[in-house]
Image: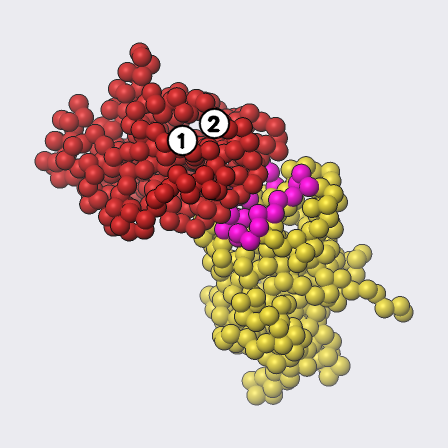
Amino acid sequence: MSQKVLLPSRKVFSDVLFELAKKDKEIIVLTSDSRGSASVENFAKYLPEQFIDVGIAEQNLVSIASGLAGCGKKPFVFSPACFLTTRSIEQIKIDVAYTNRNVKLIGVSGGVSYGPLGSTHHALEDIAFMRAIPNMTVVLPSDTNQVRVLVEKLILYTGPVYVRIGRNPIEEVYSSENIQFEIGKGNILLDGDEVTIIATGEMVKTAYDAGILLRSKGIYARVVDMHTIKPIDEELIIESAKKTKFIVTIEEHNIRGGLGSAVAEVTAQNFPVKMIILGIPDEFSITGSQKEILEYYGLTSENICGAILRELKEG
Amino acid sequence: MEDIRYLENKAREIRRTIVEMIYKARSGHIGGSLSSVDILVALYYKVLKINPKNPNWPDRDRFILSKGHSVEGYYAILADLGFIEKKELETYCKFNSRLTGHPTVKLPGVEANTGSLGHGLSIGVGMALAGKMDAKEYKVYVLMGDGEQAEGSIWEAGMSASHYRLDNLVGIIDRNRLQIGGSTESVMSLEDLSDKWKAFGWSVVETDGHNIKELLDVLENIPITPGKPTLIIAHTVKGKGVSFIENKAEWHHRIPTDEEFAKMMEELS
């Protein structure tokens, strides 16, 4: 089998949006001197009338998008997740969410994608920030095939959405023919009744691999792609809590306030089960490549597998 | 002249409503509301192309109250023009009212939720850009405070408006020279404010913010320079209309006592 060329989500997101924008002149792409990192050069070159680069001014970026949406435009705001969700958080809270404008916020290079650049460039609190804001939908697609469908769904969905994608090429979770994707509905990738692994974004592949690894040891895990963190699929979480012995969550985010917390809010109030929350500990991350950082903090399929085996033995 | 007299009377009436609303609600920002009344009256009764019966008319002019705390006069005018019922003014700052201490788009006629300073001009840039994209004739007016000029985001917006040549955008500064902590020049000096905006590529006009005729002379001749956004520095007096609170920083958001209220209403009669 020939090796497929892997693409980063940002490239696929931009390409799909570009095709849609050719037919829908209300789609406006905004960046803050981030056309390269967001892969939106095509808009600048071929659809300049639908492209706005505000320069390095993230607050202005988000408020302008709110004003455009207030006049019927469909703005897509691209900026590194680290800056977009912290520098402009008040503009997001008030001008986008409180005013309930149809603005799509695309945080690119999320998590530790920018690895060696350090914690200024890491976005490990964006899920926590965004999901605490009313009216906001929070989505972390897990692969490029899902991104393709997500972009189309975003056009049809009116309201504020935060999407976090990474920077680097990623492996596929889904085949291009087999995508199920609905905002707010988690996907079961593997089923089993020993343990549930819930992952989000680009950690889903790692979780899936852990599930396969466990199968080779005769342990059947349910693996869930929780691409939408808000509104979270409560039904699926409760059903999983009842069905399996415990839940492991895995995310490229601070273990405070992200996916693990969102899942725990559901289990704790509906069907308390033991949980293991895997992610980046509550510290400013060590530097290195994305891969090195994730390995350092144990966000690998082998480590998930090990944690589950330990829990099954001791639990 | 008839017109101007009508507008001056209207301004007095709005001032009375402001004082009444604040007195009854025991909440509000009296000083800055009174300083901005004449600007609002000139805009809403003469300049803005709007339709209270169709508040979302796509070709309407847009007005954003970036100094969202000066909300009482804004609500009073929206009620007077029929965007909302006058009776609703009685709910101002009451439980579950649409008339919150800072405006929201829940209220017909309001274009943006404001209250945190430094957002309105950027939102206005977005609306003015949309107007240019759609080749619409509408204009976008943003009323800012002078204390608000210390917000960095204002200058991000200012830089972008001239970059995009938004001559359909008008920024107005209610230059009453006071903010909650004292005079603007003692808290964080703004001068030379006119030069600052000129340096950011705007056409700047200074005017008496309580002289409706002067205000109209400027507002009815926008853009001042084709291709440039317009910035109006409207020189005003905080607390204007009530002599004993004029130019007093402590009246930024003080609530009048029964006695003070009676005196205020008498002065404004």
In the figure, the shade used to draw chain B is: red
Q: Secondary structure at mark 2?
A: loop
Q: Residues within 10 Å of mark 2 (few under 14, many from 20)?
A: some
Give B68 or A142, whichever is nearer the viewer: B68
Chain letter behind tag 1: B
Name the quadrant containing residue A116.
Answer: bottom right
In the image, B260: left or right of B190?
left
Q: Are marks 1 and 2 in contact (CB under 8 Å)?
A: yes
Name the quadrant containing residue A181.
Answer: bottom right
Q: How many marks?
A: 2
Give A184 or A21, whichever is nearer the viewer: A21
**Which residue is identified by label 1?**
B205
Q: Earlier in the sequence, mark 1 or mark 2?
A: 1
Judge whether residue A7 is colored magenta.
no
Q: Residues within 10 Å of mark 1 (few under 14, many from 20)?
A: some
- The three-letter code of the residue at mark 1 reads Val
- Position of residue A195 measured from the top left corner of the image (x, y, whole percent): 63, 75
Q: Residue at x 50, y 39 (%)?
A: B201
Give A53 or B54, whichever is nearer the viewer: A53
**Which residue is identified by label 2?**
B224
A87 in relation to B86, above or below: below
Residue at the top extreme of this rendering: B2
Q: Quadrant of the N terminus of chain A?
A: bottom right
- Position of residue A146 measured from the top left corner of the image (x, y, whole percent): 71, 57
Q: Residue at x 69, y 46 (%)?
A: A44
Q: Which region of the structure is painted magenta?
A: A48-74
User: Is residue A114 something that shows in the picture?
Assistant: yes
Chain letter behind tag 2: B
User: Is residue B77 something that shows in the picture?
Assistant: no
Query: How far apart, in angstroms, are the residues tagged by discs 1 and 2?
Result: 8 Å
Could you say which chain is coloured yellow in the image? A
Q: Secondary structure at mark 1?
A: strand
